Image (cartoon, grey):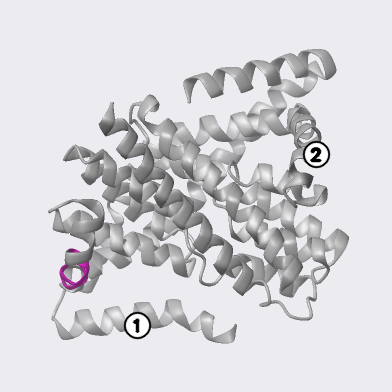
């Protein structure tokens, strides 16, 4: 894993050397790129805020544990252990929330047992679908967005089911 | 989204009213606080990566990459837009490497370009590819496992890779089926 840390510095170094060879004004083009950052955040922020407020309400009102309790029999039939049901449900909404949850699970059950490994693979094989959709389709007609979001959620769920299966046999 | 928002919001508000009326506003405020923090964090990350991509564009490397991917991307995304192809290609490769924060600004700009040309199919495809992304190296998970003294922190890489491969294939197949259905109507 040590080598992975080299990727990012190597990327920057390679690019800057290449740019220097091409006689590009590096400082000017770097700042030119950053100019886009503030408008980008400004356009995303309303959607980000609404989603985060909603997921906080969902979490703290106890709705999320209710839904988790509801769905855990279904989860068990497809091979997802009930201990990680909450993580699976949380992931589409919040990356940071599910990261916190994953580290709690690893701490409680240990990283190398079935539950721990399963939680890791379930976390890795699903994405923050609602967050990505809020950001990518900001300002797009919402009706159009439903199909790709549902498809992604279904595909993610399949990924988690497979992850639990693979953890059992590998 | 409007329906989901309304339903979940009302349900949560009703729950709070019954169980814990005092917790309602603090919960919302903490959501807002998270949004503010996340916004700042994202801003920091975007500064770094957008600066990086700025240099990449000026140095001509961006154009080279898009020329490289153009023949493939033309088929996948049905587009002639070279800039959008470059953005999408960088977005997907940053995603697979799990570079934190790098894919999003690129993906947003690619999506905007696709939609501006009325190519909603390409925008949907890019979204599904992002939302089911192949994970070559799940760096966050490995870091967490190291922190919990795992004996073999990297032994989840293969099952994660395989299951994201399955989910990406499933997503793309479902999407193309959905588009075919829509065209029939």
Horizontal relation, residue A108 to residue B50: left or right:
right
Bounds of the magenta span?
B64-70
Depth-wise, is mark 1 or mark 2 nearer the camera?
Answer: 2
Q: Which mark is residue A62?
A: none
As measured in the structure, the alpha-carbon distance from the residue carrying label 1 to the one carrying label 2 is: 51 Å
Where is residue B54 drawn, in percent x and y?
Answer: 25, 63
Image quarter of residue B35: top right
Along the polypeptide, which appears first: circle 1 or circle 2?
1
Magenta span dominant secondary structure: helix
Q: Which mark is residue A13?
A: 1
Asked if badge 1 and badge 2 are on a common chain, one would say: yes
Q: In the figure, B95 relative to B130: above or below? A: below
**What is the chain letter for disc 1?**
A
Name the residue rendered at 49%, 48% in the picture.
B40
**What is the chain letter for disc 2?**
A
Horizontal relation, residue B49 to residue A35: left or right:
right
Q: Nearer the viewer, residue B185 or B125?
A: B185
Quarter holding the C terminus of chain A? Answer: bottom right
Report which residue position mark 2 lands on.
Answer: A73
Q: Nearer the viewer, residue A22 or A86?
A: A86
Q: Is residue A28 visible?
A: no
Residue B65 inside the magenta-drawn segment:
yes
Image quarter of residue B154: bottom right
For label 2, the SS is helix
């Amino acid at each position: 894993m040590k080598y992975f840390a080299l990727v990012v510095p190597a990327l920057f170094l390679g690019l800057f050397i290449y740019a220097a060879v091409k006689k590009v004004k590096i400082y000017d083009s770097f700042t030119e790129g950053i100019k886009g950052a503030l408008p980008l955040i400004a356009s995303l922020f309303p959607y980000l805020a609404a989603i985060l407020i909603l997921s906080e309400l969902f979490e703290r009102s106890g709705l999320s544990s209710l839904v988790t309790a509801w769905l855990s029999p279904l989860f068990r039939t497809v091979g997802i252990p009930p201990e990680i049901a909450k993580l699976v449900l949380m992931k589409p909404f919040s990356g940071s929330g599910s990261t916190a949850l994953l580290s709690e699970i690893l701490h409680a059950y240990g990283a190398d047992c079935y539950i721990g490994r399963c939680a890791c693979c379930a976390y890795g094989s699903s994405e923050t679908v609602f967050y990505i959709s809020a950001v990518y389709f900001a300002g797009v007609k919402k009706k159009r967005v439903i199909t790709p979001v549902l498809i992604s959620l279904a595909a993610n769920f399949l990924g988690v089911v497979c992850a639990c299966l693979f953890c059992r046999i590998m | 989204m409007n329906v989901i928002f309304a339903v979940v919001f009302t349900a949560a508000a009703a729950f709070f009213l019954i169980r814990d009326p005092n917790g309602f506003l603090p919960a919302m405020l903490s959501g807002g606080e998270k949004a503010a923090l996340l916004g700042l964090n994202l801003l920091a990350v975007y500064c770094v990566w957008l600066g990086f991509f700025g240099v990449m564009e000026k140095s001509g490397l961006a154009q080279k990459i898009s020329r490289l991917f153009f023949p493939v991307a033309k088929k996948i995304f049905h587009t002639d837009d070279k800039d959008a192809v470059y953005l999408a290609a960088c977005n997907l490769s940053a995603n697979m490497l799990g570079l934190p924060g790098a894919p999003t600004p690129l993906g947003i700009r690619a999506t905007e370009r696709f939609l501006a040309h009325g190519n909603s199919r390409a925008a949907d495809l890019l979204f599904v590819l992002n939302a089911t992304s192949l994970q070559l190296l799940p760096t966050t998970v490995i870091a967490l496992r190291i922190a919990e003294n795992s004996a073999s922190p990297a032994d989840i890489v293969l099952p994660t890779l395989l299951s994201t491969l399955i989910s990406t294939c499933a997503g793309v197949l479902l999407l193309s089926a959905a588009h075919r259905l829509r065209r029939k109507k």
